[in-house]
Image (tube, helix red, strand yellow):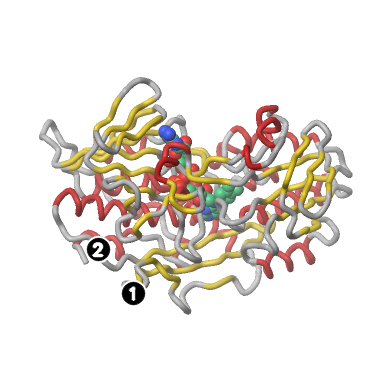
Amino acid sequence: MTHQIQGLQRRHFLGAGAAGAALSLGGLSGCATPLLGQKPIGRVVVIGAGFGGATAAKYIRQWEPRIEVTLVERNERFVSCPISNLVLSGARRIEDVTLAYDGLDRHGVRRVRDEATAIDVERREVRLKGGGVLPWDRLIVAPGVDFQFDKVPGLAAADASGAVLHAWKAGPQTVALRRQLEALPDGGVFAIAIPKAPYRCPPGPYERASVVAQYFQQHKPRSKVLVLDANPDIVSKKGLFEKAWKELYPGLIEYRPNSELLEFDAAGKLAKLTTEDVRADLFNIIPPQQAGRVAQPFISVNNQWVGVEFQTFESAKAPGVHVIGDAIAAAPGMPKSGFMANNHAKVVADAVIARITGAPINETPIIANTCYSFVSDQSVVHVASVHKWDPAQKTLVAVQGAGGLSSARNAQEAIYADGWARSIWADALG
Ligand SMILES: Cc1cc2nc3c(=O)[nH]c(=O)nc-3n(C[C@H](O)[C@H](O)[C@H](O)COP(=O)(O)OP(=O)(O)OC[C@H]3O[C@@H](n4cnc5c(N)ncnc54)[C@H](O)[C@@H]3O)c2cc1C
């Protein structure tokens, strides 16, 4: 185990479980020393400044300031998916989940606002839409997901029309979906279509159904939420969601399992499912997903995800290219979450430093996850898990007895959930 990872596990990992959630924002350490004209000992390029990429860029600079880190991000600001469902229900504003990137400057991260269009593994270069070329010794690719609109006839046209939204990347679509919900007449039916797992944030669609139901209860009591799930059952926190729906929103949420979307007619507001045809006044279709476009040449699992080796997160297909976050094929039980992406980032920061300096890598990484879900704006439930390298199986395995679920929804965890979000934003960007 290297020096950095020991320190990393003690000081930097956000804790698993509710107790770890209330970290203060003041715990971040000081500035990395800039290179001041000295030749760097290595050049790292990071693509994507989300939960994974921003964290990796910052921690490499903090732990090894002799490495030059360039972070490429196409968006001007960071908009957090966690908490964004509350923007839909009106309990938060989009400004509450939007953060600037300039906190990374004081760590000496070179920020480039552009889109990475291609990765040349042979030449070790990233090409940018704006025409630039960035050379690297190690590359970290953290682009999140892109949507497979072409898997469902009619979905690409529906997306292009701008009338049918996913709001599964927080930002303009979140604001637009809120407007659609506000415009829905009392009595209107709102249908959420969930793709087959794995997808970004397993409990996210059920959280969305819950908080939209709360909004309807308060403002459009004759309206209804229809959950059309391609999966055979609620994918995460099943009992807690079912209980909340029954007790808080009786008759307001209807759940239909095994309802995979086969075809969509945006003009007719008609979804053809494996089980039936459904009409609704407003559809929110969460499309099937795969690794973000720039990582797609490295896809090796189910034509969707990038397979990595979990001690270093190096791609199975491209030496020197490390892929983290939602884009990877996760080990069993590991969700696609911001918390996981943040944890991947710290393992990869340590591994990349080790590869550049010649230090040994950490051979026994342990990572953790806690996902909070609002079942109303005042009441929250969580699921937590810990994942440890298993040398025999050569993968990360869930640690038995670690983690677990809330025993019941409660108001205390609403405070933890807000604290967790502020902590992880500060950890990635502060
Ligand atoms: C509604 C909702 C609620 C959620 N709630 C939670 C929660 O409570 N807790 C939790 O842990 N997770 C939650 N998640 C999941 C979480 O948002 C994702 O798992 C997380 O964002 C993944 O991090 P990432 O770094 O892989 O991708 P992202 O955070 O999506 O970051 C990818 C970044 O890369 C940029 N990018 C992509 N391609 C390029 C390119 N070619 N060039 C330049 N830039 C590029 C993108 O603009 C983006 O900024 C939620 C998700 C949703 C949709």
Q: Is residue 327 above or below residue 251?
A: above
Q: Secondary structure at mark 2?
A: loop
- Labelled pair 2, 1 in contact (Cβ < 8 Å): no
Residue 403 shows in this picture: yes
Mark linked to residue 426: none
Residue 377 occupies which quadrant of the picture? bottom right
Q: Position of residue 142 (x, y in %)?
A: 40, 44
- Residue that carries the numbered disc 2 in the rendered image: 362
- Which kind of residue does numbered mark 1 sit on? Ala
Which residue is pictured at 83% across the width and 62% down the height? 250
Image quadrant containing the C terminus: top left
In this view, the mark in front (2 or 1): 1
**Residue tagged by mark 1?**
392
Q: Amino acid at mark 2?
A: Asn
Quarter assignment of residue 231: bottom right
Q: Position of residue 361 (x, y in %)?
A: 22, 60
Tell me the element at label 1: loop
Residue pictured at 63% horizontal, 47% vertical = 85
For this view, does 211 lie left or right of residue 6?
Answer: right
**Quick one: 200 or 77, which is closer to the camera?**
200
Instruction: Name, please, the residue furthest toward the left.
Output: 38
Quarter of the figure with the N terminus: bottom left
Q: Nearer the viewer, residue 418 or 247?
A: 247
